[in-house]
Image (cartoon, coloured by chain):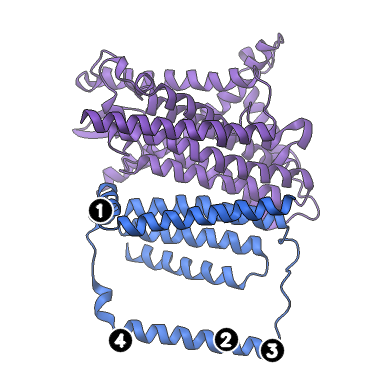
Chain colours: A purple, B blue
């Protein structure tokens, strides 16, 4: 590997990291403005034009606040837990392609940090690692509400991870590859070749499982304010609390991007062949990816302020008795169809 | 690459040691997760991506989360529940560990020829090859293993139901 290739990788890593962080800021702003709109309020509109600088003001507030470490916490794990949640959340985006290949200085540069041939499994592995942050934060706080929140999150994430994996399996059956690039290229051309039209049931199951995996309403049992104060992050303050917050939004961004990649053709624009259009194609494909992802991020917020929360037993019943059999049924049908046609 | 290998190998051994030496079960569990991660990194260095990812998904992502769940449910973490060992016991266990370690070491060095076998990375990392092997050559062990898991599942349900009555 020569110097230039290393430089390109570093630039891509920085670019993706900066874009994720910027989107986190925008998401916090959007969440507050859209929730205000849904509830007939105005929302933050004082700091900067239309209140756009509000998230930066929030960030400064978090940094300046006193960092309280409550007595009786298990200090090493208490300090480690926010990082254990945030780092996998930021790492997951590495395998998602966000545009068609770009040609610069005679080099073909794929717009993706790492092209791994087990891309989907990499994402599943990292989402399953994210549980530790929640569970250990709940345990290390040495307090009853965080502990209950942590226990709930471990049970919830394990249950829905299974369903999410099974929904992905039916996509993998169609594409015959675990590389995200192959899955995208297989959906190119007409927009009816997007997986959402081929696998509507898998899409529905995946979408519901994603909401449970990111701890968003209607599945935010781990931090249900009315019963658990704040759940796993009750005892956290200042920047460590902000890290939990950032991890939640980073997870949502990855989840939205993954939904787009698996079911909506990724950066693909229907009826266009981006790879043959040079620079314009690259710009169009990146724009298409951002727009599609933005829609699913909006959906996250929309759902949060529209639906009530599930009860815990309802959540488990839905996960194990409805979603799991449906996902298995879908795999059975897909595999049967493939076996008969090929 | 060589430096990376030695670094990760040391990390594996140290984290494995801390799993045993820690008196707090939660710390042991976290160290075991670190150990699995180092092993996965070793697989990555061998270019066996599939095995590396499986190591993390199955061991670090599923089994260890359940371990932590149980430890937290039983609240074992607060105080070290184990009784303090006597001096004689300590000496005896240390002696046994050293003997077994030396025995394994001699055996490994003695039959050293096998150590230098290299696997074809593409065959280990390829999912199609693994799947094909599972459903042709190793079909019987595969099915027997799934049966074993089913038996364990039924046993758990039975035990859990009996306690409710």
Task: Give a yes or no on whether discs 2 and 3 share a subunit.
Answer: yes
Question: What is the spatial separation of the Cα atoms under label 2 and label 3, in whole angstroms?
Answer: 11 Å
Q: Nearer the viewer, residue B68 or A70?
A: B68
Q: Quadrant of residue A152?
A: top right
> Which residue lies under the disc numbered 1?
B136
Query: Dots 4 and 1: beta carbons under 8 Å?
Result: no
Question: What is the spatial separation of the Cα atoms under label 4 and label 3, in whole angstroms?
Answer: 34 Å
Left or right, residue B161 beside residue A196 = right
> Which residue lies under the disc numbered 4?
B110
Residue at x 78% of width, y 34% of height:
A227
Residue at x 54% of width, y 52% of height:
B153
Q: Nearer the viewer, mark 2 or mark 1?
A: 1
Task: Give a yes or no on whether discs 2 and 4 share a subunit.
Answer: yes
> In the picture shown, does residue B17 fall above or below A4?
below
> Which residue lies under the disc numbered 3?
B87
Question: What is the spatial separation of the Cα atoms under label 2 and label 4, in whole angstroms?
Answer: 24 Å
Question: What is the spatial separation of the Cα atoms under label 4 and label 1, in whole angstroms?
Answer: 35 Å
Residue at x 67% of width, y 48% of height:
A137
Whether residue A53 is visible: no
Q: Identify the disc placed on residue B94.
A: 2
Q: Quadrant of residue A114?
A: top left
Q: Is mark 1 on a helix, strand or loop?
A: loop
Image location (x, y in percent) of residue A236:
72, 43
* Chain name for mark 4: B
Q: For the residue carrying disc 3, how many other residues have a C-alpha within 10 Å: few (<14), some (14-19), or many (20+)?
A: few
Query: Dots 2 and 3: beta carbons under 8 Å?
Result: no
Task: Give a yes or no on whether discs 3 and 1 share a subunit.
Answer: yes
Q: For the residue carrying disc 1, how many other residues have a C-alpha within 10 Å: few (<14), some (14-19), or many (20+)?
A: few
Image location (x, y in percent) of residue B84:
73, 79
Which of marks 3 and 4 precedes in the sequence?
A: 3
Q: Which of marks 3 and 1 is in front?
A: 1
């Amino acid at each position: 590997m020569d110097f230039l290739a290393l430089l390109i990788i570093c630039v891509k890593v920085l670019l993706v990291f900066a874009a994720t962080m910027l989107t986190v800021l925008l998401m916090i702003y959007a969440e507050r403005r859209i929730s205000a709109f849904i509830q007939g309020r105005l929302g933050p509109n004082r700091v900067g034009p239309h209140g756009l600088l509000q998230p930066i003001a929030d960030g400064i507030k978090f940094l300046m606040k006193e960092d309280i470490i409550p007595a009786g916490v298990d200090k090493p794990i208490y300090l480690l837990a926010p990082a254990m949640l945030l780092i996998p959340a930021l790492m997951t985006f590495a395998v998602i392609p966000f545009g068609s290949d770009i040609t610069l200085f005679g080099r073909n540069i794929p717009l993706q940090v790492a092209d791994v041939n087990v891309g989907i499994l990499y994402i599943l592995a990292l989402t399953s690692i994210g549980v530790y942050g929640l569970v250990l934060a709940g345990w290390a706080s040495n307090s009853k509400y965080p502990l209950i929140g942590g226990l709930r999150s471990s049970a919830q994430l394990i249950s829905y991870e299974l369903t999410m994996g099974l929904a992905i399996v039916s996509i993998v059956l169609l594409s015959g590859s675990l590389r995200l690039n192959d899955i995208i290229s297989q959906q190119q051309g007409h927009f009816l070749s997007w997986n959402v039209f081929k696998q509507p049931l898998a899409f529905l199951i995946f979408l519901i499982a994603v909401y449970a995996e990111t701890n968003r309403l209607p599945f935010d049992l781990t931090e249900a304010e009315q019963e658990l104060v704040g759940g796993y992050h009750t005892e956290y303050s200042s920047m460590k609390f902000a890290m939990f917050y950032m991890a939640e939004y980073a997870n949502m961004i990855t989840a939205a991007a993954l939904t787009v990649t698996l079911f909506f053709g990724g950066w693909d624009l229907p009826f266009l062949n981006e790879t043959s259009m040079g620079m314009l194609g690259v710009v169009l494909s990146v724009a298409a990816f951002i727009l599609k992802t933005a829609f699913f991020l909006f959906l996250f917020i929309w759902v949060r302020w529209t639906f009530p929360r599930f009860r815990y037993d309802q959540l488990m019943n839905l996960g194990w008795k409805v979603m799991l059999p449906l996902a298995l049924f879908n795999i059975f049908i897909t595999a049967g169809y493939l076996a008969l046609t090929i | 690459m060589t430096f990376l290998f030695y670094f990760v190998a040391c990390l594996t051994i140290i984290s494995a040691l801390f799993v045993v030496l820690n008196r707090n079960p939660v710390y042991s569990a976290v160290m075991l997760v670190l150990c699995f991660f180092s092993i996965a990194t070793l697989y990555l260095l061998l270019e066996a991506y599939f095995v590396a990812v499986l190591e993390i998904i199955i061991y670090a992502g599923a089994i260890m989360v359940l371990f932590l769940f149980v430890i937290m449910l039983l609240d074992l973490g607060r105080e070290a529940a184990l009784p303090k060992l006597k001096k004689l016991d300590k000496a005896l266990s240390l002696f046994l560990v050293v003997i077994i370690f030396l025995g394994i070491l001699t055996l490994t060095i003695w039959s050293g020829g096998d150590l230098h076998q290299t696997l074809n990375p593409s065959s280990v990392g390829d999912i199609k090859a693994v799947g094909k092997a599972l459903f042709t050559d190793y079909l019987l062990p595969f099915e027997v293993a799934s049966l074993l898991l089913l038996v364990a599942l039924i046993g758990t349900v039975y035990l859990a139901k009996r306690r409710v009555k």
